[in-house]
Image: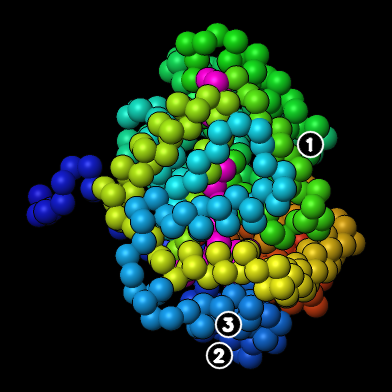
Amino acid sequence: MKLSMVADHAKWPRENDIIFNLSERAQKASEEVGKENVINATIGALIDDDGNLITIKNVYDQFKSLPNREIAAYASIAGQDDYKEAVKKICFAGNDPKGNIRVVASPGGSGAIKLAMWNYTNEGDAILTSDWYWSPYGIIGEEAGRKVANFKLFNDKGEFNIESFKEKFKEIIYKQGNIFIIINSPGHNPTGYSVSDKEWDQILDFSKKIAKDKSKKIVLFIDVAYIDYVKDDVASRKFFKKFGNLPENILTIVAFSMSKGFTAYGMRMGAAIGISSNEDIAEEFYFSLMHSCRANWSNCNRAAMSTLTHIVDDSKKLKSYKEEKNKYKDMLVRRAESFVQGAKEVELEILPYRDGFFISIPCDNPKEVCEKLTEKNLYLVPLKMGLRFAVCAVSEEKCKKAPKIIKDVLEENKSLSMNLA
Ligand SMILES: Cc1ncc(COP(=O)(O)O)c(C=O)c1O
């Protein structure tokens, strides 16, 4: 038998990240055939029409103006106090839910996911999320011995499938006594779906019904990584108010991230925001998560925290940051509209897109289709149930063209499998 040195729990398949691999192939193809002939829709970051990473100037001007000491110093374990306040301000934008709110700094939204999952689930627990989901939820859970269970995200009308949600919710809560639910909205990765206010009411009404049994513990984990790229910035935040005054056995945790909204992907800064009607539960949240910070990464990126704080606390800086960010949001909206329109014209089936960086195309054999598309110099990401196209990374013009290329390959694939059958 081959020698292995890692502990039993650390044996994982030796796989490179499929997204980074495909992106490298796309870059190589650009060098060979010219970038105007390649569509690289693999990257989950805002990329300009020339293929360069977009960086919000206001953010980096602020970052570079920080004195060395503000960059070099250790930060508080749970984050600087002014950062914690700034997170609430920028995230809720006046829609603070009523109740007890605590903030714990984390390395990106990923850190918030890790903190929350670890502290609010037991080993062997199933975590509930939709069938279309961001795969790191599974990876973070799996590393700690948790599993992922899925409800169907869409019903036949292309709306949030509340019936499937209820069914899975009941199945898990009656088995475990507790449940940890992840909902990534608005601008869900990978589909671009946003849960509507009416659908949030349905989710919360059902949760409250279950919570009447005081022995049940419900954690709603809301991943808002893409909230800054919703068409209407004001309307998109109103739903936060709904998490106020919930029964004390429902805890809401919002995962805040600077990665997308501040184009600060590599700076690794975010936060977990706990909301509870019971002050002791909020305090417990704060101290449990802070313990995990100490146990995992000690403290977070002080310069990134300061950057956010300086921008949020200065109304002039905040205004110009928002103007600049919204320029990129408008660009994203135009790209997504082009793709959706292009898909309509060639009758390419896509999942209901509302906001955010990605659009998904359901299909069989996603890996094969993805390979076939690379032959046409179109690179995107294969998922379990379809393909993910990153509108955030592709020019409007190419977003318009891509649906036809995808449709043609899907048709070829369909006739191939019909001939083989
Ligand atoms: C759905 C979702 N949640 C959270 C994140 C968090 O990213 P980060 O850890 O960079 O903040 C991402 C980033 O791709 C994401 O797509």
The residue labelled by disc 2 is 31
Cα–Cα gap, marks 3 and 2: 32 Å
Q: Where's residue 186, x and y in %?
A: 70, 48
Asked if marks 1 and 2 touch (Cβ < 8 Å), the reply is no
Residue shown at 58% from the left, 26% from the top: 277
Residue 19's x, y, as percent? Answer: 50, 64
Q: Is mark 2 within 8 Å of ligand 1?
A: no
- Residue 39 location, quadrant: bottom right
Q: Earlier in the sequence, mark 1 or mark 2?
A: 2
Q: Which mark is residue 296?
A: none
Tell me the SS state at disc 2.
helix
Q: Which numbered mark, 1 or 2, is in the foreground of this view?
A: 1
Specify the amino acid type for callout 3: Asp
The magenta-colored residue range is 248-267
Q: CA distance from mark 3 to mark 1?
A: 37 Å
Mark 3 secondary-structure assignment? helix
- Examine the rendering and report whether any part of residue 167 can be seen: no
Rendered residue at 54%/47% (across/down): 255
Which class describes the residues within 10 Å of circle 2: few (<14), some (14-19), or many (20+)? few
In the rendered image, the quadrant that contains the C terminus is top right
